[in-house]
Each structure stands twice: as C-alpha cells, then as structure tokens.
Amino acid sequence: MSWRVPRIWEDSCCWVIGGGRSLINQLEIPEDIVERVMKKELPLSAYSDYFEPIRNDHIIAVNSAFLLGDWIDAMFFGDINWFLHNRYQLRKFPGLKVSCHNRFQGKTREEREDVKYVERDRERPYGLSDKKYKVSWNYNSGACAINLAYHFGVKTVFLLGFDMKPVDDQTHWHNEYGKKTSKAVFEKHLKGFPYIKADAERLGLKIYNVNPDSAIQEFEKVSLKEILKNGIYSYHGRQGQDEARC
C-alpha cells in the first residue's frame, strides 16, 4: 500500500541534500576534515557542525546523506542495492524514511522495515507527479526527492550537492559508494530536470540550485552565501515559520 504523503511543511522551504562534491565548497569544510572523511577515518557526521546555518530547517537527505546527523527530518532513496548495504544503519535513523522501491509495499511495519512507500508514477516517469501517493522517479533518487518535498507542501526547494558532474575530480562529498559516478550515469540523471522545471512552474514550486557551477541548467543557480545574506532565504527555522516564510 502506498503512503499518502502529508502536507507537513505547508508553504515553507526545504533543503534537499544530494551527494555532489560542491557541498564541501559551499559549506567551506576544511580540507583536513574532508580528507579524513574520504578515508573513512571520520564518520559523515563530522560535517554536521558546518551545516549549522540550515540545521534548524526542513531537510530531506538523499541516500547516504542521512548519516550527517539526527537533525535531518526525512531521508529518501530509490536504489534497493543502496538500501541493502545501509539497512542496519538506517534502522537507527530517527527521522522519516521514504522510498519508491516496491520492496516496501509490505502490509506490516516489519515487512516495510519502517520505510514509508510511495509508488512510482508510471504514467509520469519524468517531472513531478501531483498524486499524493506517487512520485516521478526521474531515474535518480535526488530528482525524485524533489517530488517528495512538493508533496510535503513546500513552496521553495534548495538543492545542495546537486552537481551532476565531477568537482575537483570527485563526484561525491563522501566515499560511501566506493566508486565515482560515470559520465553516462550523470547524463541519464540529467534527463528529468527539464520536466521537473516545467512541472514546478505549473505547480508553483520554486527551486534554487545551490551550486553556481552545476551541470543542471534548469534552475536559478546561487551560492549558499547568497542565499543566507541577500534575502533569497527568508525562512529561518521551524520556530520562525509563522513570522517569515519563503
């Protein structure tokens, strides 16, 4: 049975944290910390303090980004192989766990492993599905997570770590996958974003790409500093939701 996604973040903003290497530069994480994380001498949560400017805000982590800390509200994944590799750590995650893989259609909580299941919209494989119990897969978890954010009721989405190309000769800000993403995979992932742009405009969803050098061309590109200092970002945390919204 598919989960009917509730509008728990009505008219607010949210961040979707992907795996792209630009995240390190945007957060100005010191090179020595990055090197130790990449060597797995430090856990991914070693980056947690550098997220302080946005940690009180609504956040969806994509795949291994959930390991950044328990301040993340929700995480999303679609790759079953990724799940099988991370299932034991994922059980400890206190936030919402959501997937569009049909493994999690089970009727009992034990069968679902506490993962909320949203069905892939077969009629709309690219873009944003407006059906509350479905998401457009877009053939990658990061793009699909934007659809989840829309269902949560947000009006503005900030994409952090959405590069779709190597940065500093690395494709990720961590070494959890053991290999770099190929050019062909990036090209496949990029196909959904023109459809997402069209649907976002139709549905009234504003999307910012927090990487001025991203290969994704469909959304306005800004740096994290611009967002925090120049008035683009006006919603500062859950406590201020009634006073200041995007």
Image (cartoon, rainbow, N blue to C red):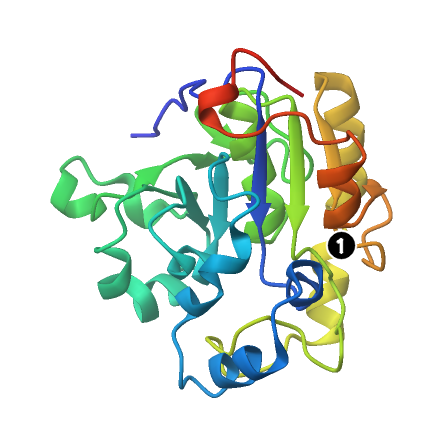
Q: For the N terminus, which image quadrant?
A: top left
Return the residue found at the far top: 242
Pick the residue in front: 126 or 4. Answer: 4
Judge whether residue 111 can be spotted in this image. yes
Q: On the rendered structure, is 144 left or right of 118?
A: right
Which residue is pictured at 31% across the width and 42% down the height? 95
Mark 1 neighbour density, 10 Å: few (under 14) some (14–19) many (20 or more)? many
Residue 117, quarter of the rendered image: top left
Judged from the image, the secondary structure of the residue bearing numbered disc 1 is helix
The residue drawn where x is 59% and y is 21% is 130
Residue 24 sits in quarter: bottom right
Is 198 situated above or below 138?
A: above
User: For mark 1, what is the residue?
Assistant: 190
The foreground one among 138 and 158 is 158
User: Where is residue 37 drawn, in percent x and y?
Assistant: 48, 79
Q: Can the viewer see residue 121?
A: no
The residue closer to the viewer here, 74 or 233, is 233
Residue 121: percent from the left, percent from the top? 54, 33
Which residue sits at x=81%, y=35%? 230
* Residue occupying the point 56% across, 85% down: 35
Note whether 219 is above or below 224 in the view shown. above
Is 234 left or right of 99, judged from the image as shown?
right
Amino acid type shown at disc 1: Leu
Where is the C terminus found, in terms of image quarters?
Answer: top right
Spot occupied by residue 243 in the image (x, y as percentages of width and height): 57, 12
Residue 161: x, y in percent?
65, 57
So how many labels did they put on this image? Answer: 1
Question: Is 119 above or below relative to 180?
Answer: above
